[in-house]
Amino acid sequence: MLKVIDLSNHQRGMSLDTLKADAFIFKATEGTYFIDDTCDTFVQQAKKLNKPYGVYHFLDQNDVIKQADFFLTHIKGYLGEAILVLDYEEYGKQGAQKAKEFLDYVYKQTGVKPLIYMNESDANSDDWLDVVAGDYGLWVAKYSQNTPVVKQWPSYAMWQYTSTPVDTSYFYGDKLAWQQYAAPKKTIAQQKEDYHTTGTRFEALRTLVIQADESFKKASGMHFSKSTVFDIEQICHTKTTTHACILYNHRKVFVTLHKDYVRKID
C-alpha cells in the first residue's frame, strides 16, 4: 500500500521532499481553459525523488471530448509514467455516461485506462456499471476513519481519507501496480495502427494544436484550423505517439499524426 498526496496550484511553492508520501498526484487541467502552472514543477520534483506520480483533469460543464483533448494536449509528456485521473465532482458532474465518454476517449487516444475520482455519495447515486465494465478504476473520497462502501465497483484503487493538512489517500497496491495503471494497455504495434506512419502532406480533420517541442508538453500558441493542408519534413515515433516535424512561420514545430486528427493526402 502506498500513501499518496495530491496537490495543485493551491499548494504552490510546496517542496515534495518535506512531505511524507510514497507517491503524488497533481492537477494538470480544468475544463477547456485552465492549465495548472504548478503541475510540471511538481512532476519534476517527484521524478527527482524517484516517486510515482499521476496527473488529473477537473471536469466542468463543457463538452467532455473537448475537455479530454485539452487534457491530453497538456500531459502528453507524462504518458507511460503517470496515472491519469478524471476528477468528477462539484460543478463538473455531468452524469456517468458523460464521464465514460471522457474515459473512453482518453483510453482510445493513449491506451491508458484512467481512474475516476469522486466521493462516496456520488459513487452510489448514479449508474456506474458501464464505467465499471470498462475497467476504469475508482479513487473514492471519504473523510472518515471508516472505509468507504461502494455498491457498483467490486473494489477501489484508492481511498482519499483526509484533506488535512493536504489531500491524502491510500493506494491499494505497490509501485509495480502503480506502473501498470500508468502503462498503455495497447501494444506498440496496436498504437501505430492509430497513426499515419508514412506521407508528406496531410489535412487537419479538426483544430490541431501545434506543439513547440516534440515532448508535446509545450504548446506553441499556434494551431491549424479544420481542413488546413500542410506539408511535413519528418515523421517521428515515441513509445506513445507518432508525430510530424514541420516548418511553420519559419519555426520548427510538431503536430500529431493520429488518424482521428489528420488525413493523409500524399
Image (tube, helix red, strand yellow):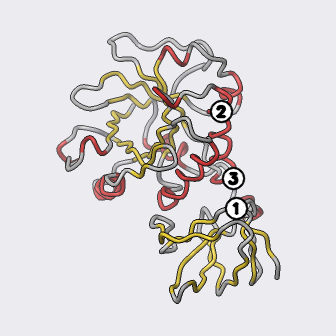
Residue 98, which numbered label? 2
Closer to the N terminus: mark 2 or mark 1?
Answer: 2
Closer to the N terminus: mark 3 or mark 1?
Answer: 3
Callout 1: SS: loop
Q: Is residue 117 above or below residue 129?
A: below
Which of pointers 2 and 1 indicates the residue nearer the eye?
1
Query: Image quadrant for the N terminus?
Result: top left
The residue to which callout 3 is attached is 186
Give me the C-alpha separation between circle 2 and circle 1: 21 Å
Give me the C-alpha separation between circle 3 and circle 2: 23 Å
Q: Is residue 187 above or below residue 234?
A: above
The residue to which callout 1 is attached is 206
Q: Is residue 19 left or right of residue 109?
A: left
Quarter of image, res 167: top left
The crowding category of the residue bearing disc 3, from other C-alpha atoms within 10 Å (few below 14, some 14 to 19, many at least 20), is some
Q: Position of residue 158 (x, y in %)?
A: 45, 28
Closer to the N terminus: mark 3 or mark 2?
Answer: 2
